[in-house]
Image (cartoon, rainbow, N blue to C red):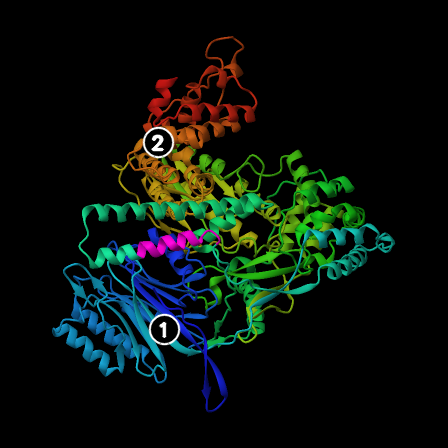
Amino acid sequence: MVDSWCPITCNSSNDGPQKLQNLGILHHNIQSLGNKVLALNVLLSSWSLKPAILCFSEHWLHKDHLLHININQYKLVANYCRNSNRYGGTCIFALNDLKIRELPFLNNLAREKVFEISAIELVDFKITVVCIYRSPNSSKEIFLELLDETLNKLLTKGRLLVLCGDWNINLLEENTHQKALQSLLISNNLQNTVLCPTRVTLNTRSLLDVMIRNKIFYHSTTKVVEMGFSDHFALVMSVLVHSPSTCSKYVVKRIFSRRNIAKFNDQLKIELWDEVYSQFDVNSAYCVFLSKFLKYFLHIFPLKKVFSKKGKKSGWITQGIKVSRQRLQLLYLLKRKMALSVHTLNYIKKYQRIYKKVISVARQRENDQIIQRSINNSKTLWQIIKKESGNGFTEIENISLEIDSMLVTNPQDISHQFNEFFVNSVDRLIHLNRNCKNDHATVNDIILNPNVLFLVPVTEEEVLKVTSKLKTKISAGFDEIPDMIVKQCIQFIKKPLTFIFNLSLSSGIFPDQMKIAKVRPIFKKGQKQNITNYRPISILSVFSKILETLMYNRVVNFLNKFKLISNAQNGFRKNKSTFTAIQTFIGQIQKTLDNKQFAFGIFLDLSKAFDVINHNLLLAKLELYGLRGIAHAWMRSYLTDRTQFVEIHHMDQKTFKIKTLTSSLKAIKHGVPQGSVLGPLLFLLFINDLPRIIQNAEVVLFADDTNILITGNDMLSLNEKIQNVKNQLEKWFYENHLIINTEKSKVIFFRGSRSTPIIRSIFSLNNKEVVCSSDVKFLGICITEDLSWATHTQYVCKKLSKTLYLIKSLRDSVSQSVLRNVYLAKFESVLKYGIIFWGGVKKDSETLFKLQKKCLRVVKGVRNRVSCRNLFREFKILTVTSLYIFEILCFIIKNRIYTTQYSDVHGYNTIHKHNLYVQFCNTERCKRGVIGMGTKIFNGLPTELKSVNNFNVFKKKLKNYLLCNVFYSLQEFFNNC
């Protein structure tokens, strides 16, 4: 067993007594980390002090899978994963509290099989740890060259270095490569601390694994340990280092406990709000209200220090499990050193299987108990899933930015830089775009709506209803008041709020303090020091959300009443979705190709569409749509004089206090407010006239996702239409100051079959060429020029494979009921998106069906050849085919505009009166379309299902029917009719 290492004290001539500690670094060639995580957690829990660093060779995992590894109290800090071959790989885990710096400059030295390197720096100790694996059959010469180059990059004066790994060079045998390695180490003042064999069989003894250090280390020892995970021993180095600061990490936050909320409500109960009711100006009334509300809020929910909890001991790892683990390790040693009988070897295998089962059941039982004891079972369940899948540990990562070749690390300066960038990037984009320099834009193309929106007074009941639909979130706007608190206390503030909201609607003024946005920078991808790799997330006051929702409801009711929103718009609208947009577009293409016509698609990407909207243009359009008078004044007030500030979190490296820093306020002059309730609706109204302007083409919109389909009987007429649409698009976008990103936009010539000649022509907008592609991502669906679905199903298969591994990584830690929830949330949700378009093609759905069955077997914990029919019934899960049937029928019933029922045409009581008319199609592609297949499947349903008129009842009965009849194919379904 590994000895525990503990802090010791020694004397220093300069500073007197100085605390030192032994820092543990472990390396093990583990030969598949994924299936040994639970046993590894048990082993580590039996050590009184854990190694600070865990280095593993041959983890055998893909990078996406490695991210799901959960080693209790550790975080993944560096890794190398193979791309072309299986097995291999290296990774490094560190204790959660350690400050780690990655060493990306070594990544370009990595070579698959030859030099698989992971490296980190322990910031507090100034120690560099490098883990390298070399495959047995790879070039030793290239390995030594790359090792030499690595050492040249790493070895600097006074810097401590630890090299570990399985290099597959036997240091117990003298040969050319062993001597070359020893010479390289000596020339760099390095020493291998491992002297005994690290891989022992009955016939061989080899020293293949190394733990190498500088000779400048104060003190270090290395132990060889039997962990029982592979045919290699593990190595544990204990390094004597100075202890870093031991200040506990803490964050300053407000405690929203039930008791505190009850106290808060008690204070609000006795407040009369008379001062609010005496105000005639909405800004004054809201200021008085907010001041009183915050007085109670800050008193009951003061800021308090909350210290981060150290990793809890795993309760499921009982003393009995630890004893069993020790016994198993002893059996491994016997097996390695002695020639055992077949009976004894079988006993060890059986003991190993039982041990694995015991620790799995223990872990599952503990997680089930945690869920059962919690108040919010669903939230706790997903917290456990997040933790068990390796995503449970989160820490504040301090941001640094490179601005004009200078590194900015001061958090206050960083908040200002972010705010400047987020606001100025929009201003700069508008300034550079020639469309936005048009000062004489008109909106004469919009037909004047003679009706005017009248703002009906708000009632207390309406305020209660709107507030009840708020999400229970802790995040808050600039006033620090979370949505959750307002939901809890709305009964005691509904009256003053109703007064303020009515004052706002009657005066046409939106309160100034509701116009302040708090912005948080969210990292996307790429270099973290590049400010362009961050996007802003805006958080508004909860009271602003309520007032906006009240206005939103009035505007939407008005727009719907007079049918002012274009049917081409599918975004943010009731009974519209991405599916209606996709079906409109693809259905028209299928119909066109079925008639042997030509089709050309334009898929536009707009640059910061919501952010660059010109307020004067928007207000002019709102007036024409009927938002005049007080409503128009209110919208003008809502859009103007808005400001924002950026908030970032920063951990002080000396005190470990997590600070919140904010920038100064900066004015927002363009766009609709991000993170707002009204913003998306205002954008829809801004772009609403585009479909009417584009003649002789089908425009399909989903918010700012703008797509145009042009069809023609021949190429000559098609090209003429394309040129006309091009001119119309350029004119509209010029007049409306929106910016087309031609680099991300695409066009496609659709063709009837793969045998049809490929057409590639040059298409440009504003004298900039748009790529003519063979495929495009359209609202999450991969569309190709021949409308085949292989590309999309491959994309879905790749996503589902990642989810399958997630479920595999969870199966030893959570129960089957939890795994089923993960399946529904992570697997089925991806599987069913867009299935109505591709699910009818057998060859495309078969691969996904195999993956689905594989996933179901993992959930149940059965072998690969076990039949899944009963498993689908047991877990109440629909097969890919049944899911396709369910989704396509729900779409057809919900969107009756696409179909006609016999009973709608005549009143005769025939046996087919509930059937749908079958549309005529020339091609198989058209027959396999949503309408063709949906009609055919509906007509194949039992009469008792077809006769159901209520949509919700139909859904319930249909699902029960599909769960009872586990259909593996459409042919099975039709045979069952």
Q: Residue at horizontal 58%, vertical 67%? A: 250
Determine whether the residue tagged by mark 2 lies in a helix, strand or loop: loop
Instruction: Locate the N terminus by quadrant.
Output: bottom left
Q: Nearer the viewer, residue 184 or 572?
A: 184
Pinpoint residue 181: horizontal percent, then vertical percent: 19, 75
Q: Residue at horizontal 23%, vertical 79%? A: 185
Instruction: Locate the C terminus by quadrant.
Output: top left
Determine whether the residue tagged by mark 1 lies in a helix, strand or loop: strand
Instruction: Please state the extent of the stretch shown in magenta in the rendering.
Output: 315-329
Q: Nearer the viewer, residue 758 or 561?
A: 561
Answer yes or no: do the residues labelled 2 and 1 have beta carbons within 8 Å?
Answer: no
| Residue 811 visible to the viewer | yes
Q: What secondary structure prevails in the magenta region?
A: helix
Q: Is residue 382 left or right of residue 442?
A: left
Sort mark 2 into few (<14), some (14-19) or many (20+) by Cα contacts within 10 Å.
Answer: some
Identify which amino acid the numbered label 2 is placed on.
Cys
Q: Nearer the viewer, residue 954 or 347?
A: 347
| Residue 703 visible to the viewer | no
How many numbered circles are shown? 2
The residue under label 2 is: 868
Q: CA distance from mark 2 to mark 1?
A: 51 Å
The residue under label 1 is: 238
The reply to whether the magenta stretch includes residue 927 is no
The reply to whether the magenta stretch includes residue 317 is yes
Pinpoint residue 367: horizontal percent, then vertical percent: 49, 47
Identify which amino acid the numbered label 1 is placed on.
Ser
Q: Which mark is residue 72?
A: none
- First-in-chain label (2 vs 1): 1
Q: Is residue 152 left or right of residue 725?
A: left
